[in-house]
Image (cartoon, helix red, strand yellow):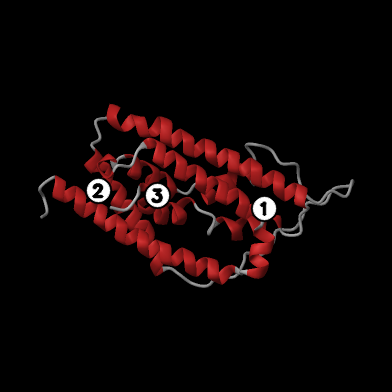
Amino acid sequence: MPSAFEIMFPIFLSTLGPLKVVPVFHSLTRNASFRYRAELAFRATIEASLVSGFVILVAGSKMEHLHISHDAIAIGGGLLLFITAVRAITSFSLAALPAQAPADASPEGEKRPCLTWMGPPTLSPLAVPTIVTPGGVVAILFFMARTDDAISTTDVGVITGVMMLANLVSMLLAARIMKFVGLAPLQVTSWVFYVLQAGMAVQAILNALARLHIAP
């Protein structure tokens, strides 16, 4: 039987991982100083981690209080993850990087506005929805409901933390990644993991239906 990490990794990589973060971060920080890029990366990672932690500790615990069964979460979450994957698979195209926004020059010669915790681009669009996507929220709740597969809250928290750390490292190295790897390989790799996500979502739905004696 595959480990919890092996089960969760493909879906978490496509919904919470760095493949989608690197191009956006690179576009937002092109030609910026390393200090600006590092500060933005750390702030966005902290905020994304707080949002993910809230989903794990607060929203996840509400499932039992609302009497939402694990099978209901498995079916509903599986459908949402499948729809997300199908949209990503069918709309795939090798896109170019978005055009860089003009810098905000000031009399003192500063080219970048001061970063704030709740302002752009830290909270939006970087922390949410680039790092923590709607699909990522669904994935967290989906796996927290799969106690039958020996996946615990600790397992979900650990792999979420691994993804946040991977996002931080990838943002700090975004310029080099885009220079030596390029956008197309990142997009193709992400597309492959969406295919795996679709298959795992369908299997989770079938397993839930079997437990409910609706399907063999």
Which residue sits at x=10%, y=47%?
Answer: 213
Who comes first in sequence, dot 2 or dot 3? 3
Give residue 189's position: percent from left, percent from top: 48, 66
Task: Write the residue at 35% across / 38% down.
Answer: 152
Q: Quadrant of residue 144?
A: top left
Whether residues under marks 2 and 1 lie with C-beta atoms below 8 angstroms apart, the answer is no
What type is the residue that disc 3 sits on? Phe
- Residue occupied by mark 1: 172
Q: Using the image as rendered, state which of residue 99 and residue 56 is in the foreground.
A: 56
Find the distance from the CA under tag 2 to the CA under tag 1: 37 Å
Element carrying mark 3: helix
Q: Is residue 120 visible?
A: no
Q: Is residue 117 left or right of residue 111?
A: left
Q: Which residue is mark 2?
A: 75
Q: Label 1: how many residues lie within 10 Å, few (<14), some (14-19) or many (20+)? A: many
For the C terminus, which image quadrant? bottom left
State whether residue 187 is above or below residue 82. Answer: below
Q: Of circles 2 and 1, which is in front?
A: 1
Mark 2 vs mark 3: give the one in front: 3
Whether label 3 touches label 1, CB < 8 Å: no
Q: Amino acid at mark 1?
A: Leu
Q: Position of residue 115 (x, y in %)?
A: 71, 41
| Marks 3/1: CA–CA distance | 25 Å
Check disc 3 and report the residue beneath it. 5
The residue mark sitting in front, 3 or 1, is: 3
Residue type, numbered disc 2:
Ile
Residue at the right extreme, as displayed: 108
Mark 2: secondary structure: helix
- Would you say the residues marked 2 and 3 are in contact, meaning their CB atoms lie under 8 Å apart? no
Residue 88 coordinates in the image, percent (x, y): 42, 63
In the displayed structure image, the side of residue 23 where residue 63 appears, left or right = left
